[in-house]
Amino acid sequence: MSLAYLVSLLYQYADNVAFLLLAAVGLMIILGVIDVINLAHGELIMMGAYITTLTYNHAHLPLPVCMILSVIGVGLFGMFLERTVIRRFYNDKLGALVATWGIGLILSQGTLLLLGPSMQSVPHPEWTVSYGGYSFGGYRLLLFAIAIFVVIAAWWFFYNTRLGVQTRATMQNAKMAQSLGVDTRRIYLLTFAGGSALAGLTGALYAPTTTIVPLMGTTFVDVAFITVVVGGGANPILGALTSSALLSVISAGLSSVLGTFIGRIGLLIAALVVIRFLPQGFSGYLRDIKRRRMARASE
Amino acid sequence: MKESKISKIWRKLNGPQELGHGPIFWSLFGCFAVVLLGYSLVGSVFSLSNLAIFFAYVPMGLGLGLLWGYGGVLSFGQAAFFGIAGYVYGIVAGNLMGTPGGTLLAAVCGIGGTMVVAAAFGYFVFYGQVSGWIIPLLTLVLSLIIETFMGQTAGYQWRLGRVLFGGYNGMTNIPSLSLGGVEFTGATVAFYVLVIAVTLAVYLGLRLLVNSRYGHAVAAVREDAERTRMLGYNVDFIQVQVFTLAAGLAGLSGVLYVSWGNYMNPSSMGMVAATLPVIWTAVGGRNSLLAVLLSTVALRWLADALAVRGGEYAFLILGALLLATMLFFPAGIVVSVARRWRDGKRRDSKIPPAPLQETNQTRGVS
């Protein structure tokens, strides 16, 4: 086994981590803070990809500008959804699931009707890096860097800004936070918008790499759901990181040896085994350990 | 004094866990059954065949009604279990072609196979005591994965015995159920009568089940799993059982569907197919089996009617219907109407109304 081969494995691993992180992090933040699963997440990703593609192909703006427009557009749409629909389901988790599923159906079928079954995609940036006989897509490496940056930025936001602290307070105990003067409705609104904007970012970033079709959200959500289930909602950032780090080992390993499909099955089985022993996912388990330690320390 | 067996069954049929009691309801129900069965004598073969396939989906819908409305567990897996049963039936029946009783064995294998998969899946999910949102997510992933798997089985190397899997083209030439020389294929009166009889039997059977002691335990798990556990019930096991039973009912629908069209393809387990049972159950009202039965048939009919006039709008309308129901009739349209009618009647008779028996779900407490 040469060093170059190891580097190529590492590249595949990083590519997988980036995909899982970007697909799941928005969903996970919404779950962690609002305790609601947004089943329309895949359709929001689709929407991001469509905004990028349309602005790039028709308004001829530079690609990064198109991507920023996607983030803003989907974020605003998320805000609209929170105000009109999601807000009514804060006490009814399963109801929120079903309602957002309806929204997803409307979005994907509406896109199909309005814009047809497929559209011209954005050209894939052809940067390559070669090392030891292997060539690596530069754009994929950029995606990995962006994924890590998103996680760090989210962490910085949660731990170093006033709004972030208020959000964490709302997560821990919404009533208590309210009585201390935190406007939890506003926190929920902003969180949902932020999670949606991250979905828009994911769609925009992956638009050059896939075919743009109305049902493209499906390819993101199945891995996103598994990542969320394995990570748990107790701490979105820690959960997303640990879960995508573990799942990528399985997915990259199995996919490179036995094909993508076996990789997917491996992910599902991994999720089933993890929740059998850690029903709250990794982040729930880590939180329990921390709590136990604190309890022991206070004795 | 010991209660006679018949009056015991009658009492259970009229238990509090389902809408519709008393002589008026049961005479209407009897008329409904007689009209449906009598229609086989006068209806054209085409309309019988259409109506039969609408009713063939009812067990799948009722299964989800039981699981979600009574058990409090939402699942997007009904389509996957429908598909697994259809494919297993196709493989067994195709290989036993010509053997007497082969299709019956195939039906047992199909439904049994799907229940085994469901039980294994349920073991991991329910014994882990996961929170409520995990099960819909993982069952959805299960549906998508099985769809992808069956989709890539095109080509001659993908076969079992003499049955080709067929990838996205689907499995074809699957023999219909046959029993004692009668073949229950799509365009026959026999299939229609079989489907109606099976559907009504499943409805009445589930009605007995939800009003039995076991059914009350199932509802107790929905209301408060922890409290039920403290009362000594094996909550995890009950949930696995209900999940498996619901999967078996979806499998029954799958077998009926394959017998009707002699055909099965992966899209019957895809994203859109996984949605349909949830829409039927939510729109009708998950807390009543009758509501699910009615809305399944009505929405199948609606989807069919829309498909004839340009199918593109069908899922858009179904999605809008689902969203509107969740926003304005969280308990479901049929159930809301029935409750309003019942309360109206109470007011007329000037008896102070009893507090509504609402569940935690309809109150929106989770």
Image (cartoon, helix red, strand yellow):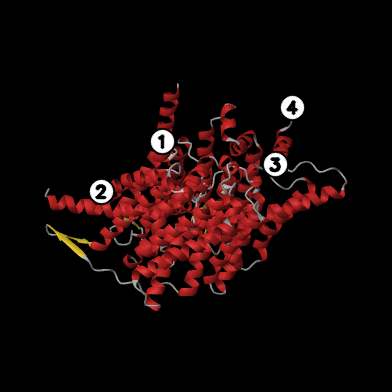
Image mark 3: chain = B
Of all residues, the one furthest to the top in this rendering is A299
Q: Position of residue B136 (x, y in %)?
A: 49, 48
Q: Which residue is label 4 attached to?
A: B2
Distance in Å between CA atoms under marks 2 and 3: 55 Å
Q: Which residue is label 2 attached to?
A: A253
Q: Residues within 10 Å of mark 3 (few under 14, many from 20)?
A: many
Distance in Å between CA atoms under marks 3 and 4: 18 Å
Q: Amino acid at mark 2?
A: Gly
Instruction: Give the left or right position of residue A61, taking residue B229 as reference.
Output: left
Distance in Å between CA atoms under marks 4 and 1: 54 Å
Q: Amino acid at mark 4?
A: Lys
Q: Position of residue A27 (x, y in %)?
A: 45, 52
Q: Are marks 4 and 1 in contact (CB under 8 Å)?
A: no
Q: Amino acid at mark 3?
A: Leu
Q: Amino acid at mark 1?
A: Tyr
Q: Are marks 1 and 3 in contact (CB under 8 Å)?
A: no
Say which quadrant the C terminus of chain A sits in.
Answer: top left
Q: Is residue B48 visible?
A: no
Q: Residue A285, labelled with which disc?
A: 1
Of all residues, the one furthest to the right in this rendering is B350
Q: Quick check: do tags 4 and 1 share a chain?
A: no
Q: Name above or below for residue A72 compared with residue A14.
A: below
Distance in Å between CA atoms under marks 4 and 2: 66 Å
Q: Residue B13, labelled with which disc?
A: 3
Image mark 1: chain = A
Distance in Å between CA atoms under marks 1 and 3: 45 Å
Q: Which structural element holds mark 3?
A: helix
Q: Which residue is painted at 32% across and 57% down in the image?
A: A146
